[in-house]
């Protein structure tokens, strides 16, 4: 179903669609295993378009846009399997822009000259578990271990840690003393890293006044961003698959004329439409710095589950060709595996949902 | 659910909540069946007197002309208080259809009694030989001067035995090809002579539907809606309203409440595996509500729901069935008890709604037919 967009939003989506026309499964294939596994020039291009600072208030040089605009851009990025970590870069600049004096790295991060990514997770199953400690109020130092960090090409991290006033957000430069990064390749040719911090120097990133805390604000924002990109992954996979159903012939007919396949196709279409409606309603109803956590968690839970289901079905509908490395459809499943598991998979999100909605005896 | 009420909306919500708390009879709360007219219609008329019976209708026809958000508030508050299902054939089906396709005379005659709750409508679509293949219907209407003579049979007609009027699809050209080009849309007074109505008992133990026999029933020619042999287009527009209206998330929200009550009473709420499934169910209701509001938003702009109504119907009815699966799971060994279960947390119907929702994926075009419609009309998959 069509979205109801303002003319500015429609323009933004068009420019995102154009940006993505130069991406796609072939480009994503070519970038597998490279260091970094994306094109830094393309990240700078996103910066020139203003996207990397799209949530940053205009008073500090950003576009001051909202979650709907974030979703419009990231939906297209997912659709084209864009490898540049645009979503993570956008939410990082949003976090860096908080407080009276924005962090000095903000400017180059908005331009795509520097890449800052969140490093929040410490447990594979509890996305909000937090043991990393911050000591020293004036010149904080962090000690702890972060996992599942998209550290590829990153110049710095937004790290959650427990300070004297509870959980807080800190900026840590990658080349600081006491920072070590151990990367493991992912199925889609990128890497996820464990970041170890041993008394690493850090800068406190203050919370915006309207947020509960900078850590929660960034976590909720990450859930929205990942869901938007996953929606695009579902759409891209679906488009390839519907086209294949129209052209591939067996038994002398296009296979898309068979009811068994038509009904599977309708089911993935409904899943994708549902996620789109859910994403844009959540986006329309929430401020980037003040997101209803139960809604963010519900969105990520549902989207993670459905993105895996849809991309798996897309491979099944392709038959054997869908199982080849050469064909692009497998990359959609692999991207869905990465994004659906980051910051908590569907089951982890449901556990948080139970807590947040007080679903108790 | 997604947005915070504006000050005006918050005031409206408070007004609705307060009024419902005072005016909805206790005996009508939490009912999963549609109570018979003697019980239900006084409540219908109370809502009507308050001006709230038709939030989605334009003001000029006696509706509220409510905004999408006000409609959602109404739905949420009706669900919260456990309000019973109202007869939908007038409010959701023929009403909006007449507003779109009816003559001024037809609107003036039929819309006010629907708002007032003085006339009940039935839908004459299915026939013994025309279920999923609706266009093969054979109930014949022959134009003889200033009236039609109707002969044939309708079946699975909800509330026909309580109804005053029926909107029906009738064959006015038996030779037309394709077959749907020979179908017209007719309004029939069910109190006319030569009509026999027999209720049919369902697996849920109620007799919500009937079979209706027409033995040369005389129907004035002015009861034709739209042009002769142009009934299929109107029928489909109406089905769009029906598919959207019957999937209102109010019923899913009420089912969720029922599950929580039963799960607390039976103790299964303490089981983390069950809570995970309940969380998934609750998230599914949230997601469906978003899909539904999105469709209603588009409908408010285009008037007739497009093929997206088929998606809403599949999604809403299959959600309702999955919720009722969870309900009988929560009830454990009480699942097959026929009467409502009395618990420390209230009396809850379990087996009845579980059985009732079997029909939801069948009426208004089965889920399989809806999938065919989407495959063809939305995804453009080959024939």
Image (tube, coloured by chain):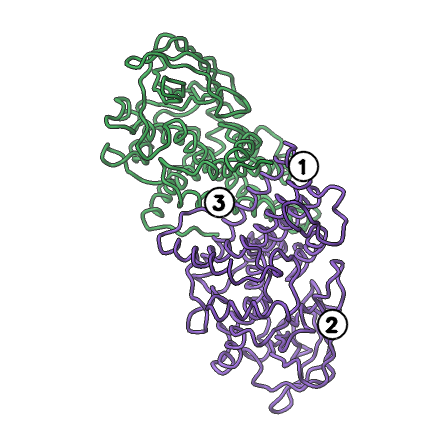
Q: In the image, are marks 1 and 3 on the same chain?
A: no
Q: Is residue B128 left or right of residue A186?
A: right
Residue B377 x/y as whole percent: 56, 57
Quadrant of the drawing holding the C terminus of chain A: top right
Q: Which color is chain B depicted in?
A: purple
> Can the viewer see residue A331 in this picture?
no
Q: Nearer the viewer, residue B310 or A258?
A: B310
Which of the chains is green? A
Q: Crowding at label 2, few (<14), some or many (≥20) Cα neighbours within 10 Å?
A: many
Is B48 left or right of A263, judged from the image as shown?
A: left
Query: Gap in Å between the C-alphas at discs 1 and 3?
Result: 29 Å
Q: Is residue A58 above or below residue B315?
A: above
Same subunit, labels 2 and 3: the answer reads no
Question: Is residue B82 positioned above or below A349 on the image?
Answer: below
Cα gap from disc 2 to disc 3, whole angstroms: 41 Å
- Name the disc covering residue B268, or none: 1
List the residue tagged with mark 2: B211
Q: Secondary structure beneath disc 2?
A: strand
In the displayed structure image, the side of residue A225 where residue B136 appears, left or right: right
Q: Quadrant of residue B368?
A: bottom right
Q: Which mark is residue A278?
A: 3
* Chain under numbered label 2: B
- Judged from the image, the secondary structure of the residue bearing numbered disc 3 is helix
Q: Is residue A98 visible?
A: yes
Position in image of residue B48 (x %, y %) = 50, 70
Residue B100 percent location from the top left of the image: 49, 72
Is disc 2 on the same chain as disc 1? yes
How packed mark 3 is, by other alpha carbons closer than 10 Å (few <14, some 14-19, many 20 or more), is many
């Amino acid at each position: 179903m069509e979205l109801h967009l303002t003319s500015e939003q429609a323009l933004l989506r068009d420019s995102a669609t154009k940006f993505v026309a130069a991406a796609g499964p072939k480009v994503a294939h070519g970038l597998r295993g490279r260091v970094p596994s994306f094109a830094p020039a393309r990240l700078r291009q996103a910066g020139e378009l203003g996207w990397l600072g799209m949530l940053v208030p205009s008073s500090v040089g950003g576009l001051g846009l909202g979650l709907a605009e974030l979703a419009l851009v990231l939906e297209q990025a997912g659709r084209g399997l864009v490898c540049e970590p645009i979503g993570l870069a956008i939410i990082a600049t949003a976090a860096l822009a908080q407080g009276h004096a924005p962090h000095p790295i903000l400017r180059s991060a908005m331009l795509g000259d520097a890449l800052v990514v969140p490093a929040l997770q410490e447990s594979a199953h509890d996305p909000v578990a937090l043991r990393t400690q911050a000591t020293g109020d004036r010149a904080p130092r962090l000690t702890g271990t972060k996992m599942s960090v998209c550290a590829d090409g990153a110049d710095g991290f937004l790290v959650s840690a427990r300070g004297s006033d509870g959980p807080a957000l800190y900026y840590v430069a990658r080349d600081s003393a006491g920072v070590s990064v151990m990367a493991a390749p992912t199925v889609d040719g990128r890497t996820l890293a464990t970041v170890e911090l041993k008394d690493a120097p850090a800068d406190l990133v203050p919370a915006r006044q309207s947020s509960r805390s900078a850590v929660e604000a960034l976590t909720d924002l990450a859930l929205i961003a990942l869901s938007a990109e996953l929606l695009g992954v579902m759409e891209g996979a679906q488009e390839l698959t519907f086209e294949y159903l129209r052209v591939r012939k067996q038994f002398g007919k296009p296979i898309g004329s068979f009811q068994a396949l038509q009904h599977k196709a309708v089911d993935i279409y409904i899943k994708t439409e549902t996620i789109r409606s859910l994403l844009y309603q959540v986006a329309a109803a929430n401020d980037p710095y003040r997101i209803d956590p139960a809604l963010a968690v519900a969105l990520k839970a549902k989207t993670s589950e459905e993105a895996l289901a849809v991309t798996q079905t897309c491979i099944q509908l392709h038959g054997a060709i869908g199982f080849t490395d050469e064909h692009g459809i497998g990359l959609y499943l692999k991207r869905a595996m990465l994004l659906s598991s980051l910051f908590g998979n569907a089951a982890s999100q449901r556990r948080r949902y139970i807590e947040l909605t007080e679903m108790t005896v | 659910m997604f947005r915070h009420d504006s000050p005006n909306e918050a005031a409206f919500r408070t007004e609705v909540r307060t009024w419902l708390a005072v005016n909805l009879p206790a005996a009508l709360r939490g009912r999963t069946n549609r109570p018979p007219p003697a019980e239900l219609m006084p409540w219908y008329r109370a809502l009507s007197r308050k001006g709230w019976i038709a939030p989605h209708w334009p003001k000029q026809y006696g509706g509220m002309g409510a905004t999408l958000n006000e409609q959602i508030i109404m739905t949420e508050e009706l669900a919260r208080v456990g309000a019973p299902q109202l007869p939908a054939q007038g409010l959701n089906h023929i009403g909006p259809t007449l507003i779109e396709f009816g003559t001024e005379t037809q609107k003036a005659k039929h819309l006010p009694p629907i708002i007032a709750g003085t006339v009940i409508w039935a839908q004459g679509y299915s026939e013994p030989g025309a279920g999923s293949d609706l266009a093969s219907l054979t109930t014949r209407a022959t134009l003889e001067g200033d009236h039609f003579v109707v002969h044939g049979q309708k079946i699975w007609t909800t509330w026909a035995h309580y109804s005053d009027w029926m909107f029906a699809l009738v064959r006015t050209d038996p030779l037309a090809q394709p077959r749907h080009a020979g179908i017209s849309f007719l309004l029939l007074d069910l109190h006319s002579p030569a009509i026999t109505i027999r209720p049919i008992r369902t697996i849920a133990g109620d007799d919500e539907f009937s079979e209706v026999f027409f033995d040369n029933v005389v129907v004035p020619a002015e009861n034709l809606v739209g042009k002769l042999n142009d009934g299929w287009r109107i029928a489909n527009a109406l089905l769009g309203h029906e598919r959207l209206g019957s999937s209102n998330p109010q019923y899913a929200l009420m089912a969720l409440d029922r599950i929580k009550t039963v799960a607390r009473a039976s103790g299964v709420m303490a089981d983390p595996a069950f809570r995970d499934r309940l969380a998934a169910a609750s998230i599914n209701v949230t997601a469906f509500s978003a899909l539904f509001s999105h469709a209603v938003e588009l409908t408010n702009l285009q008037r007739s729901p497009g093929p997206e109504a088929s998606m809403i119907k599949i999604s809403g009815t299959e959600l309702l069935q999955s919720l009722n699966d969870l309900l009988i799971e929560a009830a454990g060994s009480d699942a097959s008890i026929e009467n409502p279960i009395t618990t420390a947390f209230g009396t809850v119907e379990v087996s009845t709604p579980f059985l009732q929702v079997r029909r939801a994926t069948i009426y208004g075009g089965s889920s399989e037919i809806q999938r065919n419609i989407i495959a063809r009309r939305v995804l453009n998959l080959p024939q």
